[in-house]
Image (cartoon, rainbow, N blue to C red):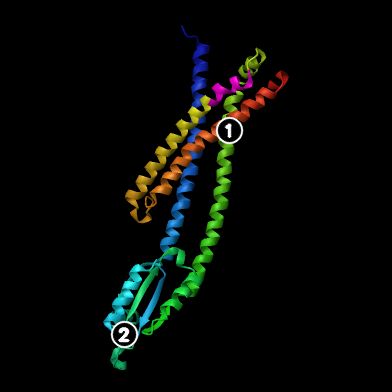
Amino acid sequence: MISKFDRFQKRRLISSYFSVVLSIFLMLFLLGVLGLFVINSKNLTNDFKETVPLTVYFKDEAQDSTHTAFREELRTAPWVKDFAFVSKEQAAELHQKEIGENFMEFLGINPLLNSYDIHLRAPYVVNDSIEKIQSHLRENPMLADAYYDKQLVTMVNDNVEKVSMWVLIISGILALIAVLLINSSMRLSIHSNRFIIKTMQMVGATKSFIRRPFIWRSIRLGIIGAVLAVIALIGLLYYLDTNYPGLGVMRDQIMTGAVLLGVLLAGILITWISTFIATQRFLNLRTDDLY
């Protein structure tokens, strides 16, 4: 018959395991959310960069063959994400809507030019790259001008660098906090077994033999916490992708999978290292120092 003391010890042991798994789960979930935010913030930044247009204007005397050849060049250019042709008539209509009056009535002509709005791929949305592209395009004798908002591009890149730096700093701080908290939970778990560790050592058990069961138990708890964190992260991704598809959280599936795998490996690695250090500490203590 199980005594009240045995039942109490069993409940305390289960409570201890539960608190360790819960702390591991919460910290790894936080790290996973942070990792997903980092990779998706880069995607959102690239999306914003790719909305900045490079507008190319053609002279009126440019023939259809010139436009056809130019479109073919854009389709094969590695720096082009997409492009759209805007005729001078379409440009006049847009201009009329913006200013609220028909400027051609008192001018008598349409002074606007046929143009292309070219959206560049994110790596090329820097002033040096765009200026090289401008110089290349201006070699076309039928080109009237190639224009982009230089100030906007400068501001976007400067802000992206600042935000990226702060995200990395905050990520590093939170990652360190998560590791310390998990390490603290594992140390508390080992602390309750310090007398067992010392007793095994006193009867002649080697340090590696004593450490082994504690490390394997901690790794199992770490795997449970990590698996729960991965399941929660998958649920979060599914929710965001279903309700906010514009965020594109599942766009980069390789990096998303790498974050989930990293969470699982972190759960194993952190618990293994923490348990090894904690058990080693108690193995090196004198018996009097255990109290």
Left or right: where 60 falls relative to 21: left
> Foreground residue, 99 or 245?
245
Residues in magenta?
Answer: 206-215
- Amino acid type, residue under disc 1 in the picture: Ile
Q: CA distance from mark 1 to mark 2?
A: 70 Å
Q: Residues within 10 Å of mark 1 (few under 14, many from 20)?
A: some
| Number of numbered callouts drawn | 2
Residue 174 coordinates in the image, percent (x, y): 55, 45
Q: Is residue 87 above or below residue 207?
A: below
Residue 21, percent from left and from top? 49, 31
Residue under label 2: 62
Is 211 part of what is drawn in magenta?
yes
Residue at image point 49% right, 37% down: 265
Describe residue 269's horizontal placement relative to residue 259 as left or right.
right
Seen in the picture, residue 110 relative to 261 is either above or below; the reply is below
User: Pointers 1 and 2 in contact (CB under 8 A)?
Assistant: no
Amino acid at pointer 2: Ala
The answer to which quarter of the image holds residue 282 is top right
Q: Nearer the viewer, mark 1 or mark 2?
A: 2
Q: Earlier in the sequence, mark 1 or mark 2?
A: 2
Where residue 147 appears, as percent x and y from the top left, is: 43, 78
Residue in the image at 72% along x and 21% along y: 286
Q: Residue at x 44, y 42 (%)?
A: 260
Q: Return the residue found at the far top.
A: 1
Asked if the magenta segment contains residue 168, the reply would be no
Image quadrant where one finds the C terminus: top right
Q: For mark 1, give the secondary structure.
A: helix
Q: Which residue is mark 1?
A: 273
Badge 2 element: loop
Query: Magenta region, mostly helix, strand or loop?
Result: helix
